[in-house]
Image (cartoon, rainbow, N blue to C red):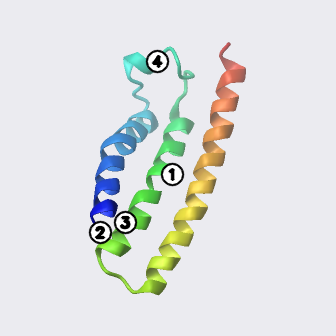
């Protein structure tokens, strides 16, 4: 249980604020030269990758039945693959737009 709580806290402190800021259109100054002008798709990709942490941790922390935990883990796997694919397309498109 400690690892799930640690992972949830870590990703809540790293991916959640950055993804939410990018979706809102706020790009940190130190990343402005690396990111495309519209970084919202990158923010959505980061938020989808963040969604994996609560989907995996919360059922285990709440001591849900194994069937619910397995279903949440399967949904988290689908979300992780979708988020990774979207992130790959987003960064690939950004490289084509910005030299």
Q: Secondary structure at mark 1?
A: helix
Q: Secondary structure at mark 2?
A: loop
Between the residue at mark 4 and the residue at mark 3, the CA separation in whole angstroms equals 33 Å
Q: Secondary structure at mark 4?
A: loop
Between the residue at mark 3 and the residue at mark 1, the CA separation in whole angstroms equals 15 Å
Q: Position of residue 95 (x, y in %)?
A: 67, 23
Q: Earlier in the sequence, mark 3 or mark 1?
A: 1
Disc on res. 1: 2
> How many numbered discs, if any?
4
Between the residue at mark 1 and the residue at mark 4, the CA separation in whole angstroms equals 22 Å
Could you tell whether 31 is left or right of 36 in the image? left
Mark 2 vs mark 4: in front = 2
Between the residue at mark 3 and the residue at mark 2, the CA separation in whole angstroms equals 8 Å
What residue does disc 4 label? 32
Q: Residue at x 54, y 36 (%)?
A: 42
Seen in the picture, residue 47 relative to 3 is either above or below; the reply is above
Q: Secondary structure at mark 3?
A: helix
| Residue 89 location, quadrant | top right
- Quarter of the rendering occupied by the C terminus: top right
Q: Position of residue 71 (x, y in %)?
A: 52, 77
Disc on res. 48: 1
Q: Earlier in the sequence, mark 4 or mark 3?
A: 4
Mark 4 vs mark 3: in front = 3
Disc on res. 57: 3
Q: Earlier in the sequence, mark 2 or mark 4?
A: 2
Could you tell whether 85 is left or right of 49 in the image? right
């Amino acid at each position: 249980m400690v690892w799930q709580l640690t992972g949830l806290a870590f990703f809540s402190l790293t991916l959640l604020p950055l993804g939410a800021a990018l979706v809102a259109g706020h790009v940190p100054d130190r990343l402005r030269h690396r990111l495309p002008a519209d970084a919202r798709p990158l923010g959505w990709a980061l938020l989808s990758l963040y969604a994996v942490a609560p989907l995996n941790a919360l059922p285990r922390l709440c001591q849900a039945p194994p069937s619910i935990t397995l279903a949440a883990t399967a949904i988290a796997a689908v979300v992780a693959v979708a988020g990774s694919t979207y992130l790959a397309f987003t960064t690939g498109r950004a490289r084509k737009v910005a030299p």
